[in-house]
Image (cartoon, rainbow, N blue to C red):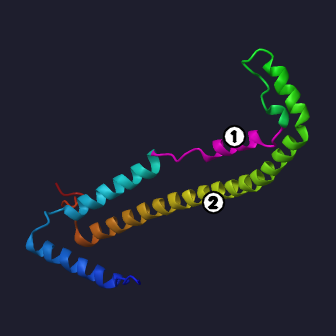
């Protein structure tokens, strides 16, 4: 069953018409748009600046420590009397199978590690790009607010603009 794709342009136009109708009727209090814009800027700034992402590089370092796999790192200790000797004996008898299994797991783990490194690199690049875009948006908004203030004769906060030399 195919789902119907909504006409986004029509929905946006409908929403804009509804907002304009409510604005004209007085449904929205004065200054609402400015308050919402300030709130959005505050939340965006808070979200992007105060919440560092997970330390993915630390996880990659843990992977690096685990590789290469080595049968010598498999603990042979035991809480059973004489158990350590039994474990070491079994390890010597099965070393070829153990080394083969470790080699197979390592053949899988190395490409996975390489993929994780590439993903972390891409995510870090994307986050840096987003931070740059947000900074550019802040600057663009500030320029537009200053231009609007000049064009309307109002201060950027919406109040009357002080004219130098006037009380």
Kindly identify which numbered label has been placed on residue 73.
none
Residue at position x 22%, y 57% in the image:
165
Q: Nearer the viewer, residue 76 or 52?
A: 76
Which residue is label 1 attached to?
A: 62
Classed neighbour count for the residue bearing mark 1: other residues with Cα under 10 Å, few (<14), some (14–19), many (≥20): few
Q: Is residue 69 positioned above or below 115 on the image? A: above
Q: Are marks 1 and 2 in contact (CB under 8 Å)?
A: no
Q: Quadrant of the N terminus?
A: bottom left
Residue 166, quarter of picture: bottom left
SS at circle 2: helix
- Single out the mark in the foreground, 1 or 2: 1
Q: Position of residue 88 (x, y in %)?
A: 86, 26
Which residue is label 2 attached to?
A: 122
Task: Tell me, yes or no, whether the highlighted magenta stretch contains residue 107.
Answer: no
Q: Earlier in the sequence, mark 1 or mark 2?
A: 1
Q: Nearer the viewer, residue 47 or 157?
A: 47
Q: Quadrant of the C terminus?
A: bottom left
SS at circle 1: helix
Q: Position of residue 154 (x, y in %)?
A: 22, 65
Q: Position of residue 93 (x, y in %)?
A: 90, 34
> Which contiguous range is marked in magenta?
51-70
Q: Does residue 151 appear left or right of residue 105 in this picture?
A: left
């Amino acid at each position: 069953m195919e789902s119907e794709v909504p006409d986004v342009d029509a929905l946006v136009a409908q929403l804009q018409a509804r907002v304009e109708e409510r604005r004209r009727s007085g449904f929205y209090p004065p200054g609402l748009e400015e308050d919402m814009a300030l709130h959005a800027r505050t939340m965006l700034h808070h979200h992007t600046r105060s919440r560092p992402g997970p330390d993915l590089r630390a996880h990659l370092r843990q992977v690096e420590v685990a590789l290469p796999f080595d049968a010598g790192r498999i603990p042979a200790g035991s809480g059973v009397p004489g158990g350590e000797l039994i474990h070491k004996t079994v390890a010597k008898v099965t070393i070829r199978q153990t080394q083969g299994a470790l080699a197979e797991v390592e053949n899988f783990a190395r490409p996975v590690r390489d993929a994780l490194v590439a993903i972390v690199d891409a995510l870090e690049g994307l986050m840096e790009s987003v931070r740059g875009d947000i900074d550019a948006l802040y600057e663009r908004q500030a320029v537009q607010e200053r231009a609007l203030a000049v064009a309307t004769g109002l201060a950027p906060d919406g109040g009357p603009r002080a004219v130098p030399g006037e009380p």
